[in-house]
């Protein structure tokens, strides 16, 4: 059966904006338009009184007026318990994301039937977030070919993923987040060496600095009360936010710009130069530079010398100072092509590659070199995004209360990985059961503190009989290439075994998936 172009898509399911792309019959990567003919769709859902889910620009406007019935930034809640009751319906991050996916695909394809998709996720997403994203795709009725790391998709867009042997630094500065990732591409296989970022640093911060600067400059001309009037008047402030953002965008193409501000004393004009923008945002740009130094260190690289390509993604990477700083820092001229569409376009290439060449589909589950295919996106070798380990009672603690997380798999370990550990045992004489709790690193750096980790699996190995204290419990921990985590606890004397894999905390279970699939299926969506 032949497939239409829009039945195999790449989807950049972003925090603020989403994009769908595909590869057309000529082999050209195209962005598929949304319901309004636009390329970029705000990832916002607004529920109308009759339950219709509106997705995109109209949803942004409606949510601004009636925030109770709108949902935005849902990506930040993926993989967490985040029940949402809207207009009498119980939703979750998965179902809201599914509505966005459904609308995106219906606009792109005419229906969501038989659509196969590669959906991108941030490289730092852990198991729970990936599982939730996968579920969102399933609930939306999509055949999810693969979840692809956003920086890997970006590298595919820049045509780097089938290159011979290169180290690539991906710099992604969006509206509200900064991510940077080091990739090693070798023989067409892509490995994430390290990833880092800042989850509340982006274009919105630049806008705020410009607003502060404009108000400071107005301070010379207006009375303090008049300045307060601008800030306190929601409508005037909203106008100023939009004007500041528009001025910022223009300053990427020109060196000076007037901003007209409506004040209680009438309209007045403030001039802002590119140099003003660079000066007022210097510390924000410094932060991204520090994070780059950190990610290079984590990747075990010396610095710019070890990097072959620097690629920029995200709308904010258009700010000229950022490319200039990267060049000065790494000694390479960064590449900047279609920064808003790069991730979706790279995902489309990957989807085309997976769906179009059946023998290559298997390579998402088997390691090995991808052969042939001049435009292939190559094989992706993912890594464990976070350290994973088990909760251990400290047998040296006299109070018997201290417990900590012993990480068995380090962050950034290439997948698949399997470890068999024979260092754990029972604590008590005749201990009947052992609780096995699997945790993953929750903060930026691995830490044994339980509070710095998040529980992802929980189970109990029971009916152990009358074992002596200190009897061996063998732990096998495995992460497959698609990120599935399996933990097996085995007690050799009784032969009892506990296998944990299906349940990931914060992710909907089977019956909940069915309920949400029905709910999403019955919800009318429009753009
Ligand atoms: P993204 O999250 O990747 O869609 O990026 C959105 C951010 O990019 C917003 O903060 C925009 O204001 C910013 N942006 C878009 N175009 C430009 C531009 N020409 N110069 C500077 N920032 C831009």
Image (spheres, helix red, strand yellow):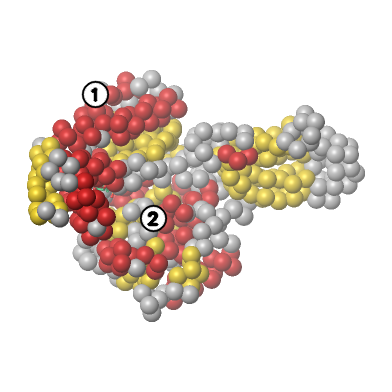
Does the beta carbon of the residue at mark 1 sit less than 8 Å from ligand 1? no
Task: Tell me the quarter of the picture where residue 113 sits.
Answer: bottom left
Image location (x, y in percent) of residue 153 = 34, 45
Image location (x, y in percent) of residue 234 = 26, 58
**Label pair 1/2, CB-CB below 8 angstroms:** no
Residue lying at the far bottom of the rendered structure: 50
Q: Secondary structure at mark 1?
A: helix
- According to the picture, the residue beneath numbered tag 1 turns out to be 328
Q: Secondary structure at mark 2?
A: loop
Residue depicted at 77% across the width and 31% down the height: 397
Give whichever of 433, 219 is nearer the camera. 219
Residue depicted at 34% across the width and 61% down the height: 44
- The residues tagged by marks 1 and 2 sit, at their Cα atoms, a distance apart of 34 Å
Residue depicted at 12% across the width and 43% down the height: 221
Give whichever of 276, 494 is nearer the camera. 276
Q: Is residue 268 above or below residue 306?
A: below
**Is there any visible trace of residue 248 in the rendered image?**
no
Q: Is residue 490 above or below residue 280?
A: below
Q: Which mark is residue 73?
A: 2
Give whichever of 475, 187 is nearer the camera. 475
Q: Is residue 255 above or below residue 465?
A: above
Give whichever of 358, 12 is nearer the camera. 12
In the visual, does 378 lie left or right of 437? Answer: left
Image location (x, y in percent) of residue 291 = 38, 31
Q: Earlier in the sequence, mark 1 or mark 2?
A: 2
Residue depicted at 38% across the width and 79% down the height: 50
**Is there any visible trace of residue 388 in the rendered image?**
yes
Image location (x, y in percent) of residue 107 = 29, 67
Task: Tell me the quarter of the picture where residue 425 sits.
Answer: top right
């Amino acid at each position: 059966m032949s497939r239409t172009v829009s039945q195999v898509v790449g989807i950049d399911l972003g925090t603020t904006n989403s994009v769908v792309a595909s590869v057309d019959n000529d082999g050209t990567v195209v962005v598929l338009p949304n319901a309004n003919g636009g390329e970029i769709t705000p990832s916002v859902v607004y529920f109308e009184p009759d339950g219709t889910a509106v997705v995109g620009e109209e949803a942004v406007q409606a949510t601004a007026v009636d925030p109770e019935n709108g949902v935005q930034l849902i990506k930040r809640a993926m993989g967490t318990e985040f029940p949402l009751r809207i207009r009498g319906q119980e939703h979750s991050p998965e179902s809201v994301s599914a509505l966005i996916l459904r609308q995106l695909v219906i606009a792109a394809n005419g229906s969501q039937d038989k659509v196969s998709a590669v959906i991108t996720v941030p490289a730092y997403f852990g198991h729970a977030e990936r599982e939730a994203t996968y579920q969102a795709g399933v609930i939306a009725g999509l055949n999810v070919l693969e979840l692809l790391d956003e920086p890997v998709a970006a590298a595919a867009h820049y045509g780097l993923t089938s290159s011979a042997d290169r180290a690539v630094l991906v710099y992604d500065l969006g509206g509200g987040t900064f991510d940077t990732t080091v990739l090693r591409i070798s023989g067409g296989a892509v490995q994430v060496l390290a990833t880092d970022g800042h989850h509340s640093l982006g274009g919105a911060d630049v806008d705020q600095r410009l607003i502060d600067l404009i108000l400071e400059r107005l301070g010379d001309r207006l009375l303090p009360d008049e300045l307060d009037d601008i800030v306190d008047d929601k409508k005037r402030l909203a106008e100023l936010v939009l004007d500041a953002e528009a001025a910022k965008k223009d300053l990427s193409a020109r060196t000076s710009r007037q901003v007209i501000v409506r004040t209680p004393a009438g309209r007045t004009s403030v001039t802002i130069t590119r140099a003003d923008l660079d000066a007022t945002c210097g510390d924000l740009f410094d932060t991204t530079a520090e994070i780059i130094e950190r990610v290079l260190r984590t990747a075990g690289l010396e610095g710019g010398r070890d990097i072959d390509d620097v690629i920029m993604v995200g709308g904010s990477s258009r700010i000229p100072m950022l490319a200039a700083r990267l060049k000065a820092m790494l000694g390479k001229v960064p590449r900047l092509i279609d920064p808003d569409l790069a991730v979706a376009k790279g995902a489309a290439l990957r989807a085309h590659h997976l769906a179009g060449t059946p023998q290559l589909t298997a390579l998402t589950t088997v390691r090995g070199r991808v052969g042939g295919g001049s435009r292939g996106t190559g094989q992706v070798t993912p890594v464990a995004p976070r350290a994973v380990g088990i909760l251990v009672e400290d047998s040296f603690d006299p109070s018997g209360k201290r417990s900590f997380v012993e990480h068995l798999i380090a962050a950034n370990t290439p997948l698949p990985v399997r470890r068999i550990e024979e260092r754990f045992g029972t604590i008590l004489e005749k201990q009947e059961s052992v609780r096995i709790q699997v945790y993953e690193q929750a903060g930026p750096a691995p830490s044994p503190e339980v509070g710095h980790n998040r529980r992802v699996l929980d189970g109990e190995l029971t009916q152990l009989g009358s074992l002596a204290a200190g009897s061996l419990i063998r732990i096998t921990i495995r992460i497959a290439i698609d990120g599935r985590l399996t933990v097996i606890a085995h007690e050799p004397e009784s032969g009892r075994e506990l296998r944990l894999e299906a349940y990931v905390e914060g992710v909907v279970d089977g019956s909940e998936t069915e309920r949400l699939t029905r709910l999403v299926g019955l919800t009318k969506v429009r753009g």
